[in-house]
Each structure stands twice: as structure tokens, then as C-alpha cells.
Image (cartoon, grey):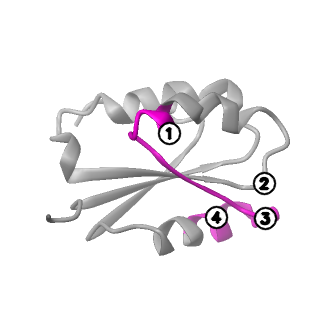
Amino acid sequence: MRGPDISVVVTNYNYATYIRRCLRSLLNQDIERGRYEIIVVDDHSTDDSLQAIAAFVEAGDVKVVVNKKNLGVGGSSRVGVDHSRGKYFVRVDADDYVQPA
């Protein structure tokens, strides 16, 4: 089976309030779902971010990587790229809303 063309890396640190909307917007793109993967890198959040994305993980729509310590946006982005399988990658903040492509 062919891997995704695009890896979308979502960096998150204490954005439980916004992350659901971000992930829903990424899942509602016009591009075929198998062509992209969504990887959330949680940067050692202290809020309920992981609970907020649990349903997306359980549905198999999102892969989550949890940092053991806070690395910042740059370090978390690198972690996401290291876990990606796509030819291209896009970085998205957890409070972003992405319009359909």
C-alpha cells in the first residue's frame, strides 16, 4: 500500500479549547483522505488536550506523539516530521482552522 502524499503536523501545547475545531477542519478537506495523514505532536501539555483529541485517535483519523518534555514549536515540528510518512509536510498550529482545499 502506498503511503500518504502529505503529512500534516499539528503542534499543540495547551490548546484543548481549539484542537477539536482544527482537527475537524483538517478532516473536512476536499482532497481524498488517504492522500494525507494528520500527526498531532503534543508538547507536554498540562491541560486536557489529550482527552480533547481522544475520539479522533480512537477513530483512526489522527496519530499522536506526546513529548516527554516541552520542546517548543520548532522541536515539536521536528518530532512530527520524524514521524511522518508523506513526501511533503505542512505544519499547522492547534488553534488554526484550515479551509477546504
Q: Secondary structure at mark 4?
A: helix
Mark 4 nearby-residue class (10 Å; few <14, some 14–19, many ≥20): many
Q: Amino acid at mark 2?
A: His
Give the label on residue 44, or none: 2
Mark 1 nearby-residue class (10 Å; few <14, some 14–19, many ≥20): some
Q: CA distance from mark 3 to mark 2?
A: 6 Å
Are the residues at dot 3 and dot 2 in contact (C-beta closer than 8 Å)?
yes
Are the residues at dot 4 and dot 3 in contact (C-beta closer than 8 Å)?
no
Q: Residue at x 40, y 40 (%)?
A: 60
Mark 2 nearby-residue class (10 Å; few <14, some 14–19, many ≥20): many
| Residue underneath mark 3 | 68
Closer to viewer: mark 2 or mark 1: 1
Q: Earlier in the sequence, mark 2 or mark 1?
A: 2
Residues in magenta, as a range: 56-77
Q: Residue furthest front?
A: 58
Q: Amino acid at mark 3?
A: Lys
Q: Secondary structure at mark 3?
A: loop
| Residue underneath mark 1 | 57
Q: Residue at x 64, y 29 (%)?
A: 52
Q: Is residue 100 left or right of residue 19?
A: left
Q: Secondary structure at mark 1?
A: helix
Asked whether residue 79 is drawn in magenta, I would say no
Q: State the image coordinates of residue 35 (x, y, percent, origin top left).
A: 19, 52
Q: Amino acid at mark 1?
A: Val
Q: CA distance from mark 4 to mark 3?
A: 11 Å
Q: Quadrant of residue 32?
A: top left
Q: State the image coordinates of residue 14 (x, y, percent, origin top left).
A: 76, 39
Q: Amino acid at mark 4?
A: Ser
Give the label on residue 76, or none: 4
Are the residues at dot 3 and dot 1 in contact (C-beta closer than 8 Å)?
no
Q: Quadrant of the C terminus?
A: top left
Q: CA distance from mark 4 to mark 1?
A: 19 Å
